[in-house]
């Protein structure tokens, strides 16, 4: 268990079998069991990337090539969810580390964000990381796949 700002978090506990191969786009199946105690302080594997991305592969092969694509984002895209909930004011180094870890960011990610955004507070960095993970990077991947 990990304590994040007074909230107990049990991390990395599988709730279903991985949704790959024949399980893709199917109802969840029970997870594979384990023996003994299982640590719950680290996130599990990250979401599948390019090799496990049949939709991206289809776009790269030319699917939907006749459909126009307008893609864009701004640094405030995720603030709409972070500001009203108050999460942006709770952001600190521990939360940033947890969020970056959950999104699969390697060690040193927070330092890169700090260097690229001089003077940004932890809430600004949280918004930037979240926007990149959920908006900017997926938009770039779709656009690149359509080339």
Image (cartoon, rainbow, N blue to C red):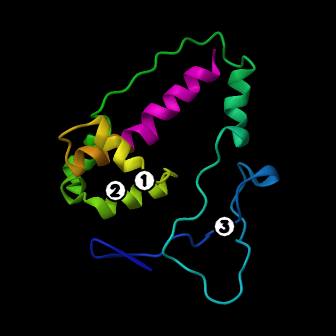
Who's the residue at 48% across and 51% down the image?
Answer: 103
* Front residue of 121 and 52: 121
- Majority secondary structure in the magenta region: helix
Gap between marks 3 and 2, in whole Å?
27 Å
Residue named by callout 3: 16
* Front residue of 73 and 25: 73
- Asked whether, in this view, residue 137 is left or right of residue 26, the answer is left
Label 1 Cα crowd, 10 Å radius (few <14 / some 14-19 / many 20+): many
Q: Secondary structure at mark 1?
A: helix
Label 3 Cα crowd, 10 Å radius (few <14 / some 14-19 / many 20+): few
Residue named by callout 2: 96
Residue 66 screen position, x and y as percent: 64, 9
Q: Is residue 138 above or below residue 114?
A: above
Q: Is residue 77 above or below residue 142?
A: below
Return the residue found at the far bottom: 36
In the picture, the disc for residue 100 is 1
- Asked whether, in this view, residue 125 is left or right of residue 132, the answer is left
Q: Give the mark nearest the N terminus, 3 or 2.
A: 3
Who's the residue at 40% across and 61% down the image?
Answer: 98
Label 2 Cα crowd, 10 Å radius (few <14 / some 14-19 / many 20+): many
Who's the residue at 31% across and 48% down the image?
Answer: 126
Decide: marks 2, 1 in contact (CB < 8 A)?
yes
Gap between marks 1 and 3, in whole Å?
23 Å
Q: Quadrant of residue 53?
A: top right
Residue 140 screen position, x and y as percent: 51, 26
- Asked whether, in this view, residue 21 is left or right of residue 30, the answer is right
């Amino acid at each position: 268990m990990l304590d994040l700002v007074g909230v107990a978090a049990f991390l990395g506990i599988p709730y279903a079998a991985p949704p790959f191969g024949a399980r893709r786009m199917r109802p969840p199946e029970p997870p594979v069991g384990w023996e003994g105690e299982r640590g719950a302080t680290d996130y599990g594997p990250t979401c599948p990337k390019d090799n496990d991305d049949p939709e991206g592969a289809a776009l790269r092969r030319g699917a939907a090539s006749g459909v126009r694509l307008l893609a864009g984002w701004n640094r405030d895209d995720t603030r709409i969810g972070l500001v009203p909930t108050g999460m942006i004011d709770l952001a600190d180094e521990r939360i940033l580390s947890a969020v970056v870890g959950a999104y699969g960011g390697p060690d040193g990610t927070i330092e890169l964000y700090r260097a690229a955004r001089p003077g940004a507070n932890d809430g600004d960095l949280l918004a930037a990381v979240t926007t990149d993970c959920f908006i900017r990077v997926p938009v770039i991947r779709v656009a690149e796949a359509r080339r």
